[in-house]
Image (spheres, rainbow, N blue to C red):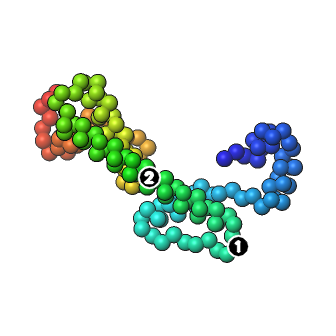
Amino acid sequence: MLSVNALAAKYQMHEATLRKWIKKEGWVRIDASARRSVVTAALQGEQVPEAPEGDEAARRMLEAAAEDLNDMDLGLKNARLALMRVHVILSEQGHSLMPQDLKVISETNRINIDTIRRIRQMDDPEDKGSADVKTVMDLIMGRRDGLVADNSE
């Protein structure tokens, strides 16, 4: 979304002229944080509210949230299909794959799991980083918190 200043510069007009035109035409910005709240609530199974009668901004925001939900649903389905395809390839050909192919398949697997986790909001929103591969493998193998001694080093 471009700012009013950026739009005015792009179309080589004065900002004040553009603001008057925007006001006259009734343009409104869609509040991204409100839309995210609606999407989050819908993903958690809550009822999505209806826009109040005559509130064009709320109607547009709810339409955008519905589009976001449809996109996320499609992305989730695609990630699951790709994940299943990786599983089939590894099950049928895993023993005969070249190392570079295994690397690509592993990366595809990771990307699709990350996509599913993000869409399903399974990660802590405060965690800006991601665990390295060794940490993840240690967790999988039970080497964290003294569960199993790590003798590989």
Relative to 3, 11 lies left or right: right
Q: How dense is the environment of label 2, judged by Cα within 10 Å: few (below 14), some, or many (20 and up)?
A: few
Q: Looking at the image, tell me whether mark 2 or mark 1 is earlier in sequence order.
A: 1
In which quarter of the view is residue 23 placed? bottom right
Secondary structure beneath label 2: helix
Three-letter residue code for mark 1 = Gly
Secondary structure beneath label 1: loop
Q: Residue at x 81, y 40 (%)?
A: 11
Q: Residue 108 location, x and y as percent?
A: 34, 37
Write down the residue under mark 1: 54
In which quarter of the view is residue 137 placed? top left
Q: Residue 95 location, x and y as percent?
A: 16, 30
Q: Residue at x 31, y 39 (%)?
A: 109
What label sits on residue 74 in the rendered view? 2
Relative to 86, 53 lies left or right: right
Give the CA separation, mark 2 to mark 1.
31 Å
What label sits on residue 129 in the rendered view? none
Three-letter residue code for mark 2 = Leu
Q: Looking at the image, which is closer to me, 103 or 6?
A: 103
Q: Residue at x 39, y 55 (%)?
A: 120
44 in relation to 153, above or below: below
User: Which of the two discs, 2 and 1, sits closer to the camera?
Assistant: 2
Relative to 92, 75 lies left or right: right
Relative to 145, 17 lies left or right: right
